[in-house]
Image: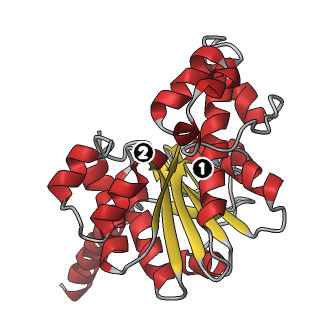
Amino acid sequence: MLKKTLLVAIFLFSIVNTAQNKPAYKLYSKNGKKVSYKRMISKMSKADMVLFGELHNNPIIHWLQFETTEDLYKKRKIMLGAEMLEADNQKELEDYLTGTIDQKTFDTVARLWSNYTTDYKPLVDFAKQNNLKFIATNIPRKFASLVYRGGFEALDELSAEEKSWIAPLPIKYDATLPGYIKMKEMMGGHGGDNLPKAQAIKDATMAHFILKNKKEEELFIHYNGAYHSDDFEGIYWYLKQQKPELNIITVSVVEQENVKKITKNNKHKADFIIVVPTTMTKTY
């Protein structure tokens, strides 16, 4: 009887253990080796800046962004920035952070993404609660649209005030970067040469405002779509063009059916690669 009971117990433990062995994510190094969250935090804490790439609708990444920010804050001074807030809304953002306006007013006067409340408000509120700087780094969307329709030349007609919300013109642009080539190919030629240029003006502008606001003693944590820093291009490339000595840690995220082993084509995207299941719930 004891033997039978022991066998049943072992069987039940095996079932429970298998059910629990469903990781929501796995963390890998650039070369595809599994690494710990603690190791990632240690490396980030010694950097000048972190480019935390995301899939905009993935809840695991938004949770990890918050946890990472909170843990890095325990180690050193930090400041935050995000693609999801546009440069011409910096004053409104600062008014919210300082308590000059409340959340309801901020929702009205700033252009916030539809998933702001669930995915980005926790980060902004963390900055508010801890008196941290938060920088709206992205180019106003309507100006990126101008580039998509008329190339970089379309920006020449902007006023001096409008130009203060974008990277200084003319921006450096390398059409041979693999990421821009891939973007053009994925769209099947739609948008022509101006599609990657519209991406480049976003990358250049985000890099510009990161560098403009970065303080030497502080770690700048920037949240952006992974495609803006994947393969050490995009924002990363523009940052390095201006300050090659910067120690920048990049993070990317990919979806796989099996998270327990990173696929070959997903390696080398970033210093740290977060693999999440393709079945993970989306926030929108």
How dense is the environment of label 1, judged by Cα within 10 Å: few (below 14), some, or many (20 and up)?
A: many
Q: Nearer the viewer, residue 233 or 36?
A: 233
In this picture, residue 38 sits left or right of residue 233: left
Please name the colour scheme applied to the rendered image.
secondary structure
The residue lying at 52 percent from left, 62 percent from top is 26
The residue lying at 67 percent from left, 66 percent from top is 249
Q: Where does label 1 land, which residue? A: 206
How dense is the environment of label 2, judged by Cα within 10 Å: few (below 14), some, or many (20 and up)?
A: some
* Residue 284 screen position, x and y as percent: 29, 39
Q: Is label 1 in a helix, a strand or a loop?
A: helix
Q: Where does label 2 land, which residue? A: 56
The residue lying at 55 percent from left, 81 percent from top is 38
Q: Nearer the viewer, residue 198 or 66?
A: 198
Residue 177 sits in quarter: top right
The residue lying at 21 percent from left, 61 percent from top is 101
Disc 1 versus disc 2: nearer the observer: 1
Q: Is label 2 in a helix, a strand or a loop?
A: loop
* Residue 216 screen position, x and y as percent: 67, 78
* Residue 10 screen position, x and y as percent: 31, 77
Residue 191's place in the image compared with 172, above or below, is above
Please identify the residue farthest to the front as the structure is shown: 160
Q: Nearer the viewer, residue 56 or 143?
A: 143
In this picture, residue 214 sits left or right of residue 74: right
Could you tell me the amino acid type at mark 2?
His
Residue 112 sits in quarter: top left
In this picture, residue 246 sits left or right of residue 209: right
